């Protein structure tokens, strides 16, 4: 029995299913969570299906459910797009009867008592894993579910620029496109913005460079307040302001989070594996797109030293 079929068997056994994903969700986290929940509601209308977690401006049209701890009794918790406890939004998954993890990141899980840990770094997104799951198990997919799943695939591949296995990704994108996702509305949501927001981005166009071509920004809390943007829009939303520059093989965005007393680093590269550096500082992600929460600006400088050394080594062997 395939792992997809094993997950399906658990889903059929439980009358109540609660779906989690990571904190500060990107569109892949939202897309895989909402897409899966919507598929399950369509195919099992008699079951109770809930979604929980924090929200930000990446939620598209989704809203999360407010549920009491009692809903976790005799429930199945499914955690998507994350496998590390400190990054899971809403830690009540531990109250569920069983836990399943579906994730495509490099990190191993530290969640205890997991019934199924479905980790496959060969997928480019968690949404792609869910599409593969629903296809394998022959589940009905509505246009609403397809919109979220397609959206997760689009964003986590950078509009299909960064793919682990292009043949599989495009095959699954074709499959989910047949389910009539509302692509235009999703693209309007994702790629259009107000004039004020576009002008505000001018605050984030400048950057500094290390000796060997690592571009970086340090965004203080004062700058976040001045911009009027939310944290996610700056932390993850501005990192690729430094992308696509020939002389820049690695770029990093560091954003101060005073509420959680950390500095969130987002690291990206072109053709260079850097996830081991993220892991060194307690983070993780993908080989060329990853991040970590750092204690202070001194630790930020340590990360930059490591990234600069990696860029130097890569240049030497190119």
Image (cartoon, helix red, strand yellow):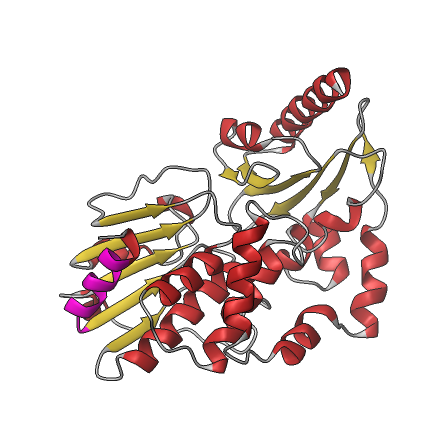
Task: Tell me if residue 149 comes above or below residue 236 in the rendering.
Answer: below
Q: Image check: 64 left or right of 246?
A: left
Residue 12 spot, x, y in % from top left: 19, 69
Residue 176 spot, x, y in % from top left: 50, 70
12 magenta-colored: yes
Q: Image check: 153 left or right of 74?
A: right
Q: Main secondary structure of the magenta part?
A: helix
Task: Tell me if residue 109 comes above or below residue 202 in the rendering.
Answer: above
Residue at 37% x, 78% y is 140
Residue at 38% x, 43% y is 84
Q: Residue furthest bottom?
A: 45
- Tell which of 111 and 86 is nearer to you: 111
Instruction: Look at the image and tell me whether residue 220 can be seen.
Output: yes
Location of residue 147 (image quadrant): bottom right
Q: Quadrant of the C terminus?
A: top right
- Tell which of 127 and 227 is nearer to you: 127
Residue at 60% x, 33% y is 296
Q: Which residues are magenta?
A: 5-15
14 magenta-colored: yes
Residue at 71% x, 48% y is 239
- Tell which of 141 and 211 is nearer to you: 141
């Amino acid at each position: 029995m395939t792992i997809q079929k094993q997950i399906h068997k658990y889903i059929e056994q439980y009358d109540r299913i609660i779906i989690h994903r990571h904190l500060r969700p990107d569109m892949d986290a939202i897309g895989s969570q909402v897409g899966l929940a919507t598929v399950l509601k369509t195919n099992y209308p008699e079951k109770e299906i809930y979604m929980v977690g924090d929200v930000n401006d990446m939620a598209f049209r989704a809203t999360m459910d407010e549920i009491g701890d009692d809903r976790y009794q005799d429930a199945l918790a499914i955690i998507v797009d994350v496998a590390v406890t400190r990054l899971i939004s809403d830690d009540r998954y531990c109250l569920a009867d069983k836990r399943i993890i579906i994730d495509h990141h490099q990190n191993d899980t530290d969640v205890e008592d997991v019934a199924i840990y479905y980790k496959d770094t060969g997928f480019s997104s968690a949404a792609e894993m869910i599409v593969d799951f629903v296809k394998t198990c022959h589940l009905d997919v509505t246009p609403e579910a397809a919109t979220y799943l397609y959206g997760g695939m689009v964003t986590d591949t950078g509009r299909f620029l960064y793919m682990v296995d292009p043949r599989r990704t495009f095959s699954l994108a074709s499959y989910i496109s047949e389910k009539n996702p509302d692509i235009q509305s999703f693209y309007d949501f994702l790629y259009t913005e107000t004039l004020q927001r576009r002008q505000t981005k001018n605050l984030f166009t400048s950057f500094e460079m290390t000796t060997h071509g690592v571009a970086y920004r340090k965004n203080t809390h004062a700058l976040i307040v001045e911009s009027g943007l939310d944290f996610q829009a700056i932390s993850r939303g501005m990192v690729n302001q430094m992308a696509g520059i020939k002389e820049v093989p690695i770029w990093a965005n560091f954003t101060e989070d005073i509420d959680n007393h950390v500095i969130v680093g987002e690291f990206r590269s072109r053709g260079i594996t850097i996830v081991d550096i993220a892991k060194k500082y307690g983070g993780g992600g993908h080989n060329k797109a990853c991040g970590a929460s750092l204690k202070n600006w001194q630790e930020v400088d340590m990360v930059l030293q490591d990234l600069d050394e990696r860029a130097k080594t890569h240049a030497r062997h190119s």
